[in-house]
Image: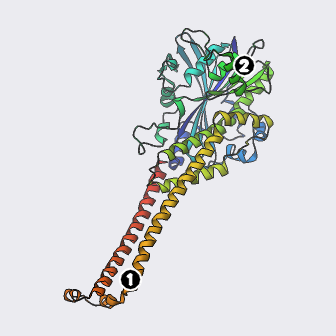
């Protein structure tokens, strides 16, 4: 069973410092990553490989205007999705225990998204008429940044006379050697936290287009294997991660989009968004064009939703509850801006776009993450406000008692003496009521000094802490 065409997009997420946004752009230009403008047809033609022509008119009509304005805006802004692309066309091979899989690294994108979320997209095309087991095996190994368990071991990458033992080396040593300089530093929260603490499983998300021979039956077993990226087992045979036919059928039913079945399916799982088709050559070109345009941006917006919400979940889980009121306010501000500017229940005008969007929302648990995060932050803020109110009430109680006592005894008993030089002998001659008034006067002045000093310290430390966080992010 051969795959006539195999195209992949591997998505690598990162969290960059928005404080260095302008510097980041300069570095991208120095490394030949250019800001993509939607009408630059000649430049786009070099990104997707031969015989792929992306329809930008269709792309503009597919998404709602409020999403299109964020995605396809030629203006560079922290509020937009800024796509920087580089045409590469580098030749490489993946060497596994059983085979050598040639591939072409067509191009790479670096998407600088709002709120410091970044997504690298690597476009790869395999050799034509490659066995489908090999195509799935390639995706399984390539998406793993640093193999740690047995099922991830057993592959190395030969790329332009270099040997890389894992994909992370290829990414950070060859394709984007500058990227790590702009990562947000989370070591201040915990020294053992990874550079991308909300990156699940240390594996890239995969988008794949597999064009198979017309006589191939796209049955449940093949669809399940594609959705799970099950390639070969340790003996080199076709691998499937379940032996229960009923389970497989239910999994395929839950994750497969079948509008154009039986010749075209989309599988949306935690591993990837996989297109499988057995259509003729002309229809294949139309679907492949859509894969590199509409599907690309559909995955991008939903992956951004997931990453942003995981980022907020991580950051509020690491709060020092008694000290981080300002941080809670910033997180609430972020999720408010996120929900008002970017988080929409529908992003596509087309029916198929709305239906596919539901698969991503279900698999990524976007709705649940959003509700849980917003409710948690609002509850944290409410508790902080209650604590602040309690402290103010306690202070008001103390000041009220102080004022009542001062009024009862009359501070005017010694207040006139404060305008003259006070002799120690005069103090010792005070009556009981004069002593009380004198002590109240000194305590009142001391309390006022402490309150002013504390307020100034809180304001100053809060200001410098905000500036420090801004530089780090």
Closer to the observer: label 2 or label 1? 1
The picture quadrant where one finds residue 243 is top right
Q: Tell me if 446 is positioned left or right of 459 in this view.
A: left
Q: Which is more toward the observer, 63 or 39? A: 63
Q: Which is more toward the observer, 201 or 75? A: 201
Q: Tell me if 284 is positioned left or right of 22 in this view.
A: right
The answer to whether residue 368 of the structure is visible from this angle is: yes
Q: Which residue is mark 2?
A: 211
Q: Residues within 10 Å of mark 2 (few under 14, many from 20)?
A: many
Rounded to the nearest angstrom, the CA distance separating label 2 from label 1 is 88 Å
Q: Find residue 210 and report its horizontal and vertical position in percent.
A: 69, 20
Q: Find residue 337 and report its horizontal and vertical position in percent.
A: 62, 52
The answer to whether residue 4 of the structure is visible from this angle is: no
Q: Which is more toward the observer, 227 or 45? A: 227
Query: Circle 2 sits in a helix, a strand or a loop, which is it?
Result: strand
Query: Circle 1 sits in a helix, a strand or a loop, which is it?
Result: helix
Q: Tell me if 139 is positioned left or right of 222 in this view.
A: left
Residue at 56% over, 19% down: 92
Residue at 66% over, 41% down: 367
The picture quadrant where one finds residue 118 is top right
Q: Which of disc 1 and disc 2 is earlier in sequence?
A: 2
Q: Find residue 411 and report its horizontal and vertical position in percent.
A: 36, 86
Residue most toward the left?
A: 425
Residue at 41% over, 42% down: 190
The quadrant of the rendering that contains the N terminus is top right
Q: Residues within 10 Å of mark 1 (few under 14, many from 20)?
A: some
CB-based contact (under 8 Å), mark 2 and mark 1: no
Q: Which residue is mark 1?
A: 406
Q: Find residue 257 and report its horizontal and vertical position in percent.
A: 75, 28
């Amino acid at each position: 069973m051969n795959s006539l065409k195999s195209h992949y997009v591997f998505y690598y997420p990162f969290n960059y410092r928005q404080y260095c946004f302008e510097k980041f752009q300069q570095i991208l230009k120095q490394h030949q990553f250019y800001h993509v403008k939607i009408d630059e047809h000649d430049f786009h033609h070099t990104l997707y490989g031969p015989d792929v022509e992306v329809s930008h008119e269709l792309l503009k009509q597919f998404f709602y205007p409020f999403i299109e304005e964020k995605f396809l805006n030629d203006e560079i802004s922290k509020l937009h999705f800024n796509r920087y692309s580089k045409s590469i066309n580098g030749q490489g091979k993946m060497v596994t225990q059983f085979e050598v899989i040639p591939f072409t690294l067509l191009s790479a994108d670096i998407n600088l998204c709002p709120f410091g979320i970044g997504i690298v997209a690597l476009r790869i095309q395999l050799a034509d008429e490659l066995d489908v087991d090999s195509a799935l095996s390639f995706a399984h190994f390539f998406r793993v940044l640093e193999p740690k368990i047995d099922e991830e071991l057993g592959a190395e990458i030969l790329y332009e006379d270099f040997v890389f033992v894992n994909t992370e080396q290829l990414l950070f040593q060859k394709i984007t050697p500058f990227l790590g300089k702009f990562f947000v530093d989370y070591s201040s929260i915990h020294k053992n936290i990874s550079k991308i603490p909300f990156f699940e499983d240390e594996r890239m998300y995969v988008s794949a287009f597999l064009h198979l021979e017309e006589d191939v039956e796209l049955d449940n077993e093949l669809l399940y294997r594609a959705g799970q990226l099950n390639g070969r087992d340790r003996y080199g045979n076709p691998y499937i991660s379940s032996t229960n036919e009923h389970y497989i059928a239910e999994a395929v039913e839950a994750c497969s989009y079948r509008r154009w079945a039986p010749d075209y399916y989309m599988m949306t799982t935690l591993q990837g968004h996989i297109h499988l088709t057995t259509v003729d050559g002309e229809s294949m070109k139309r679907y492949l064009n859509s894969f590199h345009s509409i599907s690309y941006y559909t995955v991008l917006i939903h992956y951004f939703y997931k990453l942003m919400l995981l980022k907020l979940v991580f950051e509020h889980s690491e709060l020092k509850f008694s000290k981080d009121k300002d941080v809670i306010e910033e997180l609430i501000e972020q999720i408010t801006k996120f929900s008002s500017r970017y988080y929409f229940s529908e992003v596509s005008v087309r029916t198929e776009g709305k239906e596919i969007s539901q698969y991503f929302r279900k698999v990524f648990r976007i709705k649940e993450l959003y509700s849980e995060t917003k409710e948690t932050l609002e509850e944290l803020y409410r508790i902080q406000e209650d604590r602040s109110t309690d402290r103010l009430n306690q202070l008001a109680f103390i000041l009220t008692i102080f004022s009542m006592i001062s009024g009862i005894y009359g501070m005017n008993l010694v207040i006139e003496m404060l305008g003259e030089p006070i002799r120690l002998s005069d103090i010792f001659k005070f009556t009981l009521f004069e002593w009380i008034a004198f002590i109240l006067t000194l305590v009142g002045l001391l309390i006022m000094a402490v309150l002013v000093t504390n307020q100034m310290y809180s304001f100053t430390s809060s200001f410098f802490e905000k500036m420090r966080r801004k530089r780090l992010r």
